[in-house]
Image (tube, grey):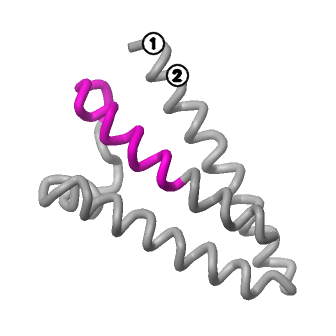
Amino acid sequence: MKAAAITIVVLSLADAILTLEHMARGVAFEANPLMADLILVGAWLFILVKVGTTVGAALFLYVARKYPLARNMTLVALGAYALLMVWHVRFLLCW
């Protein structure tokens, strides 16, 4: 579970960086309106808040790992980030 929590955080950072890259190319936008507003304030603030929030959530899931729901939600988060990375790679390869 520790490796899963770390992987979630790393994928969150990759998502933030790739989102900024896609936005700079004009091929994507930030879907979360709150995070989109943070991007307008500054890229570093966007990354800090996005990854910081993910660290908090991953830490919570790791601490609660003895509960089946927390383990399942960890797997859901990993799956969601895996799909998101496929989306990012698609944009990298196609644009």
The disc labelled 1 sits on which kind of residue? Cys
Q: Is residue 68 left or right of residue 14?
A: right
**Quadrant location of the N terminus?**
bottom right
Q: Which residue is mark 1?
A: 94
Q: Is residue 79 above or below residue 44?
A: above
Judging depth in this view, the residue of 70 and 53 nearest the camera is 53
Residue placed at 66% from the left, 43% from the top? Answer: 82
Q: Are marks 2 and 1 in contact (CB under 8 Å)?
A: yes
Residue with the mark numbered 2: 90
Q: Nearer the viewer, residue 33 or 35?
A: 35
Task: Report the quarter where the C terminus lies.
Answer: top left
Residue type at numbered disc 2: Arg
Task: Please report the residue visible at 35 percent of the width from the left and 69 percent of the height from the top.
Answer: 49
At 40% from the left and 49% from the top, the residue drawn is: 16
Which residue is at the far top?
94
Residue 73 is left or right of residue 91, and the answer is right
Q: Quadrant of residue 85?
A: top right
Mark 2 neighbour class, 10 Å CA radius: few under 14, some 14 to 19, many 20 or more: few
Q: Is residue 53 above or below residue 32?
A: below
Residue 13 in the image: x percent, y percent?
48, 53
Queried whether the magenta region covers residue 16, the answer comes back as yes
User: For this rendering, which residue is in front, 35 or 9?
Assistant: 9
Residue 39 is situated, as x and y percent measured from the top left of the image, at 21, 54
Q: Nearer the viewer, residue 17 or 38?
A: 17
Q: Is residue 56 above or below residue 34?
A: below
Q: Which portion, as a residue range, is magenta?
A: 12-28
Q: Which quadrant of the figure has residue 65?
A: bottom right
Q: Is the residue 31 above or below the residue 73 in the image? A: above
In the orientation shown, which residue stands out farthest toward the left?
41
Query: Residue at the spot x=13%, y=60% of the render?
Result: 41
Rendered location of residue 78, percent (x, y): 70, 54
